[in-house]
Amino acid sequence: MDDYTWRKRLAERRRRRQRERLFLLSLIVMAITGLFLYFSVYTKTPEYAMREMVTAYRAGDADTVRRHLDLDSITLAAYDDLTSDLFKYDTQLSDRERSLFENFYVLIRRQMCKGAVKVLNTYLDKREWTLPGEILKGRQLGIDYDLLLDRSLIRHTSLIDLEDVEHHGEEATATFAIVEDYSQVPFTLKVTLKNLANDSFNIGGSEVELFGKKIKFPGFTFNLGGSDWKIVSVDNYRGYLDAASPILRKNLADYIDATEEIVFRYNQTFTAEQNNFISLQKSPYGIMLANQRVDVSNYITNTIIPSLENRQAELDEIPVPEGAQFLASLRQESTRVTIMAWHSYITGITENSATALDTAESLHKQELILDQRIEEIVHNSAIARNLPELP
């Protein structure tokens, strides 16, 4: 090999090594730039926040989910959507009563929403649907909160995935694919997000004219000191209710029609049995005698309880549409609690047990609450019959 060829190869080798070093340096610069953009820009965007929230929800990370939800703002707006037609299907109300109750539920808006926030937080922590208790326990505010939750659809709505996020200056909108579990109605839920961190600013998002055409470049809203993107409202919640509720109401109406004859027939049976039960308890001494206690116990065991079991068996044979699952489960629970109450009553009178009688009374009160709830569903009633006093 002559000297010229050797020098030429040596120069080529040096150039190749320089190119390799330059390529490696470019990779390092790109990696550093990518990491910088990811941690300083992308992690501050609403896209990142929403994807992080969805991942956290599926993993059961309640704190991360809560970080991206302004539950106070969300529930206030959702309450208005939910109650806008709360009294529409209550056929037992006059126009004046309907107006009074609509105004009343505006007054208790914050108390109702505070309860909803408590319910949602408990669900995020435990994945269990509970009731808020306190002032919303029972019917102190004239409404069955459990029934309200069922009508909100929240307990039987499933998240499919995040679909899209769009920027609008200092706000953003996100869309989620969801499905109502009972009706299987798919829906695209649209929400509004705000960055509640201080000193947020925008980059890009401007519109320029190029070759006679207007082109809009995507923008980013972020804060190098931290971002706090939160969902503040569900923009089309009313639309979701309007999409799924008619199907559920039809399911419910079909189930009520299918079970109407069974309920009517057994109501007559229960009325006759109740009259017989009262007659068996009558005593000139004010308390039941020993033989009466035996007769009453046998009557409950051999007549009343079998009637309850037979009615439930007939109801269980009727196919239950998905939209009527809540009513069907309430009827099953009412039957179960009523039978337990009768068993406790039998123990109380045969063993002279005050504790068993107290248990029977407590269970009977639960039964009455369940039966009232069932009646409200059957008659499309939203409220108690008397306007309650504000505490």
Image (tube, rainbow, N blue to C red):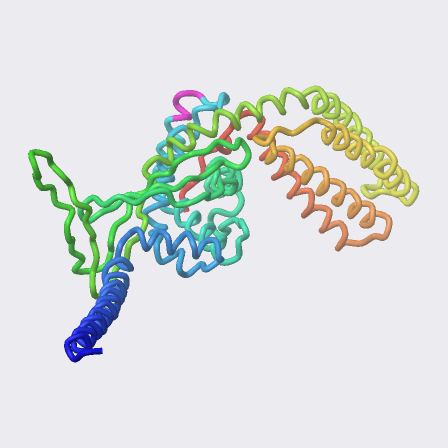
Where on the picture, by quarter, is residue 297? top right
| Quarter of the view holding residue 275 | top right
Q: Residue at x 46, y 49 (%)?
A: 135
Q: Residue at 73% of width from left, 47% of height from top?
A: 360
Q: Where in the figure is residue 134, as x and y percent of width and height?
A: 48, 52
Taking the view exactly as shown, the residue that stands out farthest to the right is 291
Between residues 350 and 61, which one lies in front from this camera angle? 61
Residue 163 in view, yes or no? yes
Image position of 172 with respect to 82: above or below: below
For the question of whether residue 372 can be seen, the reply is no
Res. 6 image quadrant: bottom left
Residue 77 lies within the magenta run = no
Pick the front one: 94 or 8: 8
By secondary structure, the bulk of the magenta-drawn segment is best described as helix
The quadrant of the image that shows the N terminus is bottom left
Residue most toward the bottom?
3
Q: Which residues are magenta?
A: 94-98
Q: From what the image shows, is residue 376 above or below residue 294?
A: above
Measured as percent of width and height from the top left, residue 169 is found at 17, 46
Name the spot of residue 296 as percent of width and height, x first. 86, 38
Left or right: residue 62 versus residue 204 is right
| Residue at 81%, 41% in the rendered image | 286
Q: Where's residue 89, x and y in %?
A: 47, 24
Total marks shown come to 0
Compared to residue 97, the image places residue 104 above or below, namely below
Q: Nearer the viewer, residue 281 or 171?
A: 171
